[in-house]
Amino acid sequence: MSDKALYQQKKEAQLNVWKAEIDKLKAKSSMASADAQIEMNKQITMLEKKIDEGKTKLSDLIQATDDMYESMKAGVESSWDSLKTAFSDMTSKIKN
């Protein structure tokens, strides 16, 4: 398997973990008070948007030529780290 395919597989696995976490948060939200549900749903929507952005960046990277792939990878990693931080911050707010 190529480095590009392994990289894609790793990132897709992380996206799947985040999707599963969102499903847990949705279940938790359904048991919260109305006001808490509103806030949690806003946060969940933001998380879902971030995941969609991550999918788009990953798709762009995977579709890049091998030469462009290497030059784009650093930028994607930086964006991915920002996504990971935002996801962590938002989920901790919802959980607390």
Image: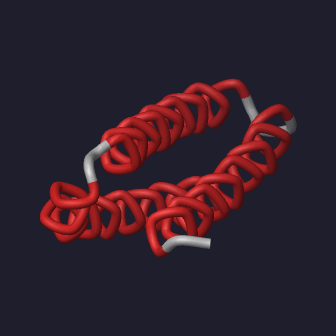
Number of labelled discs? 0
Residue 30 lies, in percent from the top left, at: 82, 32
Q: Looking at the image, which is closer to me, 46 or 57? A: 57
Considering only vertical position in the picture, is 16 above or below 96?
above
Q: From what the image shows, is residue 11 above or below residue 62?
A: below
Q: Residue at x 18, y 60 (%)?
A: 67
| Residue 68 relative to residue 57: left or right | left
What is the quadrant of the N terminus in the image? bottom right
Query: Dividing the picture into quarters, in which one does residue 57 lie?
Result: top left
Q: Where does residue 46 sit, x and y in percent of width and height?
A: 44, 35
Q: Residue at x 49, y 69 (%)?
A: 7
Q: Is residue 76 above or below residue 52?
A: below
Q: Please name whichever residue, 80 or 45, is drawn nearer the observer in this view of the structure.
A: 80
Q: Quadrant of residue 91?
A: bottom right
Classify residue 17 as left or right of residue 71: right
Residue name at image x 59 percent, y 30 percent: 41
Horizontal side, residue 91 vs residue 13: left or right: left
